[in-house]
Amino acid sequence: MDIKNDKIEHDELIEHLMEEPVVLYDENDEEHIFETVAIITLDDNDDIYVLVVPTEENEDFLEDEVLVLILDEDDNLNSVHDEETLTKVMEKYHELLVEEDEE
């Protein structure tokens, strides 16, 4: 395994997630388009969390609601359901927003 190449490919994927829309499908196989608002890592693990918002008005989401996804080892995005993890990710996201406002 070439760790350097894996790192480059991973960095390219992160860049792609920030620049391109994220397309997700619901249980009815309907397409929904999202925009990435943040990519977050936590201090206690190496997981990468992608926070997205719908690009169009969506009755399933509140105005300021974000969807938290985790990037798995196969580079697929999956919903995060663990409440403790969601809380940690959202706390980190709010810290980033405060830092951004202070700049």
Image (spheres, helix red, strand yellow):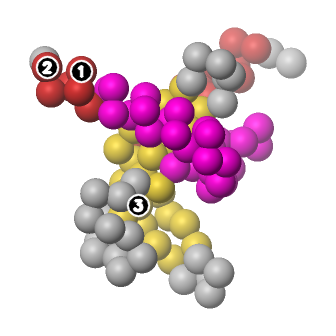
Q: Quadrant of residue 101?
A: top left
The amino acid pointed to by label 1 is Glu
Q: Residues within 10 Å of mark 1 (few under 14, many from 20)?
A: few
Q: Residues within 10 Å of mark 3 (few under 14, many from 20)?
A: some
Viewer-side label of 2, 3: 2
Question: Which residue is the site of mark 2?
Answer: 102
Q: Quadrant of residue 96?
A: top left
Mark 2 and mark 3: span between their CA atoms?
A: 27 Å
Q: Look at the numbered discs 1 and 2 and tell me whether their residues touch, using CB distance below 8 Å.
A: yes
Viewer-side label of 3, 1: 1
The amino acid pointed to by label 2 is Glu
Q: Is residue 15 visible?
A: no
Which residue is rendered at x = 13% and y = 18% of the image? 103
Which residue is rendered at x = 62% and y = 40% of the image? 84
Question: Which residue is the site of mark 1?
Answer: 99
| Left or right, 97 with reference to 27 | left
Q: Position of residue 90 (x, y in %)?
A: 44, 39
Q: Position of residue 32 (x, y in %)?
A: 46, 73
Q: Residues within 10 Å of mark 2 (few under 14, many from 20)?
A: few
Front-lying residue, 88 or 7: 88
Mark 1 and mark 2: span between their CA atoms?
A: 5 Å
Q: Is residue 101 visible?
A: yes
Q: Secondary structure at mark 1?
A: helix
Q: Secondary structure at mark 2?
A: helix
Give the magenta-colored segment's residue range: 68-96
Which residue is rendered at x = 72% and y = 42% of the image? 72
Front-lying residue, 35 or 46: 46
Question: Which residue is the site of mark 3?
Answer: 34
In the figure, 44 relative to 85: above or below? above
Which residue is rendered at x = 68% and y = 22% of the image? 45
Counting the numbered discs, the total is: 3
Mark 3 or mark 1: whose residue is earlier in sequence: 3
